[in-house]
Amino acid sequence: MTQHVYLVDDDEAIRDSLGWLLQSRNLNCQAYASAESFLDAWQMEMTGCLLLDIRMKGMSGLELFDRLLELNNPLPVIFLTGHGDVPMAVGALKKGAFDFVEKPFDDNELVNRVLEAMQLDQNRRAVAASSDSLNSLIEKLTTRERQVMELILAGKFNKVIADELSISMRTVEVHRANLFEKMGVRTAVELSQLMSVRTGAGINNHG
Amino acid sequence: MTQHVYLVDDDEAIRDSLGWLLQSRNLNCQAYASAESFLDAWQMEMTGCLLLDIRMKGMSGLELFDRLLELNNPLPVIFLTGHGDVPMAVGALKKGAFDFVEKPFDDNELVNRVLEAMQLDQNRRAVAASSDSLNSLIEKLTTRERQVMELILAGKFNKVIADELSISMRTVEVHRANLFEKMGVRTAVELSQLMSVRTGAGINNHG
DNA sequence: ATCTGAATTGTGGATATCCACAACCCATGC
DNA sequence: GCATGGGTTGTGGATATCCACAATTCAGAT
């Protein structure tokens, strides 16, 4: 699915002018007149970014943002507002919003933010995709193979693994060879490195 | 070194009242009357957090923040301001400030932010410390041992390593045993996992 | 009932790793 | 000159891993 700029604003003039601006930069824009209508249309597969007005009739942009957080929405969110205050902006950013811009905004500035957000989304998708492909590999393992893999990753010898699972060493060897094949690795070290990317030890802010 | 709350504000009344507030909560507070004086006193070893007023005579809080970023200052920064606007707050947070609060602030709220910031600092220190201890282990390796380690982590057999380094397999075995000893691991898998924490594959925002 | 996939085990041999004991070369430093 | 430490190599035996060939048991699916 190609990337879109999802625009949620109850002001038709804004939707039109922003839509025109974005399309003039070759960006696909999908506009929604209310938070509710976007929430209805929302899907996990949406890629790109979300431009979200705060003050709207019905559900506010901030409320929609909270709903999306509960849904683990991966779309970077750029808030647009004409009447924002500092605590509102700070709260939104601390919750993970990508940006918070006040109207009236500079067209070029906004487009740049949009492009940055879309780039971030793309990067995250790439990471998620490799993580997914790894998970699908793991799912193809049998129960025993997963058990053996755990113990291999704990740095244990086949002999010890055999003891702990109360099976013969030979069986462990078979499982080991099979799971290496399925995981596409040739050595335990490669397996360890492959798995270490998913239990990623990242240092993130405000954690 | 114990944690401190470093307070930079050119208003003596604020320094006094905040100092009193913090000490009443058993927090060590160190106050500075200007950005310049804090910058002079600044050391990488400072732990805790930094409360930073924006509008000050001389260097502003934002300028100081930029200087500290260049110094890779690890202290979480909480901005305090009576005249902040949204773009200022957004800019500060996107650059990595921990929080941005407006005066007048609620005492309990501010103390909570301070405690969160100090907790974050402590967590980061812990991560950095383990990373440092790992680096010091690596520094104790000889050149050859590091070379051998690289190739082990590339999942290669001793035989291959010997070929690539143009040394005998026996020598590789010796280096391998020595570096395992120095790194405190018993298997290549453990070594791989040990090293994987430092090439941390974290997914951070706005990257 | 038959088939398929998962789990299990064995034999035997080729490779690899682990390790103690011994030793040589070479540069730096006292 | 001599001690120290890093790098190098060898022998030989105990362990472990890798792998082809062969086979049994059991549960679920057709």
Image (cartoon, coloured by chain):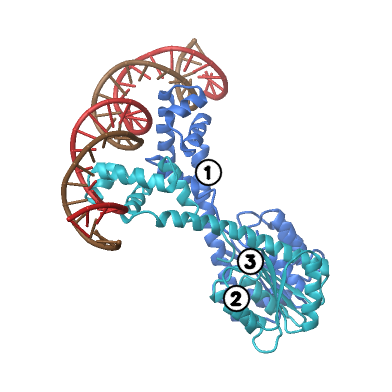
Chain colours: A blue, B cyan, C brown, D red
Q: Residue at x 55, y 57 (%)?
A: B129
- Left/right placement of residue A102 relative to residue C17 reads right
Report in which chain the residue with disc 3 lies: B
Report in which chain the residue with disc 2 lies: B
Placement of the C terminus of chain B among the 4 image quadrants: bottom right
Q: Where residue A89 appears, x then y in whole percent?
A: 72, 72
Furthest-bottom residue in this view: B58
Q: Amino acid at mark 1?
A: Asn
Q: Which residue is mark 3?
A: B47
Q: Nearer the viewer, residue B20 or A141?
A: B20
Answer few, some or many: residues within 10 Å of disc 1's Cα (few below 14, many 20 plus, some between 14 and 19): few
Camera-side mark, 3 or 1: 3
Q: Amino acid at mark 3?
A: Thr
Q: Which residue is mark 1?
A: A135
Label 3 residue SS:
loop
Q: Nearer the viewer, residue A191 or A151?
A: A151
- Marks 2, 3 in one chain: yes
Q: Is residue A109 visible?
A: no
> In the picture shown, does residue A135 fall above or below B39?
above
> In the picture shown, does residue C27 fall above or below A108?
above
